[in-house]
Amino acid sequence: MEKRLNQRLRTAYVLQNILEEKIFFGELKKQIPPEELPFINMNVLTTLRHLTALKSFLSSLVRKKIPHKHRLAEYLLLAAISEILYLNTPDYAVINETVNDIKKHCDKFLAGMANAVLRKIAAEKENFKAKSRQISPFPKNFLPLLEGYEKAQISAIAESVNQISPLDISVKDDPTKWKKTLNSDLLPNGTLRLYEYPAVNSLPGYQQGAWWVQDVAASLPVAALGDLQGKKVIDLCAAPGGKTAQLAAKGAQVTALDISESRLQTLKENMQRLGFSQVISKLADAAQYLQNTAEQYDVVLLDAPCSASGTFRRHPEVLHIKTLQDAETQVALQQNLLNLCENALKPGGILLYCVCSICKKEGEEQIEKFLSTHSNFKLSPINEADISPYGKWEQPLISPKGWIRTLPFMQKGMDSFFICKMQRII
C-alpha cells in the first residue's frame, strides 16, 4: 500500500481489498503505517459492522449505479457515511476530504454526487442512525450459516455485531492475583477481561510471559479437558498457540503441530515468551501426520480448520466474505481429520473437537454424523465444574447433550465456538 495515501483513501483501499479479494483485515494491517492504524482500524471495523445499512443508504441516495471503473468512490462513500454516523469526526472534514479524493482519483461528476449524498447524511444523521438499527447486519450470503437457530437467538446474535470486543486474557496461574494487577473482570473459567486497554505489550506481565491474549470461548476447549497433569497431548492445527499454552500450563506433555511454517514460528515465539520450553513443535500437514504416525496420545485436540464464521465480533469482515459454501468445503476436511484421529489416540483416550464456527454443519451436525459412524467412540459429557471454577456463567454453555455451544451475545460477548469431548472406547 502506498505511503503517500491519506487515511481515508487508505481506508477505502483496505475495504476494497477485503470485500473484493476476500482478504482478512489482519493481513492488510501489516501494510498500514503504525501511526495511521488506530484511525483506519476503527473506521474499517465500524464500516464492516454496519455495512448492510450503509449500502442500503447509499443505494437509496444514488440514482445511477457507480461505474465499475470508479468503484473506489463507493468504498470512499461507505467509509465516509460510517464516519459521519458512528464516529466523532466533524462532518465538514469527512465531506471535504472524501469529495476531493473522489474528484482526484475517480470522477469530478461523481464528486458532485458524493457531496450531495454526504451532506444529506450529515443533515439527517439521527434519522439515518435510527434506520440503521432496523436493518439486519447479516448480508443474504451469510444468513444460511445461521440455519438451525431460533429467531430470538438470531436477533440476539445480530445485536452482538455492533458491540466492540473486549480484551480477554488467559494467565498461566493465579487469575485472582492478576485480576487486581490488570484491573480486570474475572470470568467464570478464569479468563480476565479488560474493556479499556492500552497496547497489549505495555500491560503488566506481558514481557514476563505471565499471560497471553485469548478470547474466552477459545479458552474453553482446554478447560473442558479437566486435569491434564502428565498427560501426553497432541494439539493439531495449533498455531498461533493459545490452546498449546493452556495445555502446557496445565502440566501436559504437549506436541504442537501446524502446516504453516510462519504460523508455527509465531507459536514457537509465543512459547518462548511464556517460558514453555517443553512444548515440542512439528511442521506437518495434520492429515498426513495422522495417517503415518506411530505415536499415541492420551488426548488429541483437533481445533479443526473451519469457516471462522464465529469470529465476526472481532473480525466483522467475516460477515461479508464467508458463505455456506465455505463452511461446506471445510466440513469435508474436518470429517477426514476426525476419521484419522483414532490413529494417534490411545484406547480410553480423549478426542476433543472444536471449531470457531457458528454454522451447525461444522459443529453439532458434524459430530452427530461422526458418532453415528464410529462405534468405537462415545460422547464424554463436559463437566460444568471444569469450565467454571470461578463462578457461574450468565447463560448455560453446555447443551443437554453434553457439548458446548457458545454464541456471541453470551457473557457480554464471546466468539461462537462448538466444543465436543469424545472418548475412544477400544
Image (spheres, helix red, strand yellow):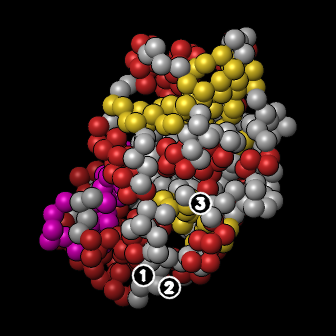
361 vs 388, nearest the viewer? 388
The reply to whether residue 139 is in sight is no
Mark 1 touches mark 2? (CB < 8 Å): yes
What percent of the width, then of the height, locates residue 189?
69, 56
Within 10 Å of disc 3 (Cα), the crowding (few <14, some 14-19, many 20+) is few
Name the magenta segment's main secondary structure: helix
Residue stretch in magenta: 1-29
Question: Residue 114: x, y in percent?
Answer: 34, 72
Is residue 349 in the magenta section?
Answer: no
Residue designated by label 1: 119
Q: Amino acid at mark 1?
A: Arg
Amino acid type of disc 3? Asp
Observer-nearest residue: 105 or 325?
Answer: 325
Identify the mark at residue 173; answer none if there is no mark.
3
**What percent of the width, then of the height, locates residue 405?**
71, 43
Q: Gap in Å between the C-alphas at discs 1 and 2?
A: 6 Å
Q: Quadrant of the C terminus?
A: top right
| Residue, disc 2 | 123
User: Which marked residue is nearer to the observer: mark 2 or mark 3?
Assistant: 3
Q: The N terminus appears in which quarter of the rendering?
A: bottom left
Using the image, determine if residue 105 lies above or below residue 20: below
**Label 1: which secondary element:** helix
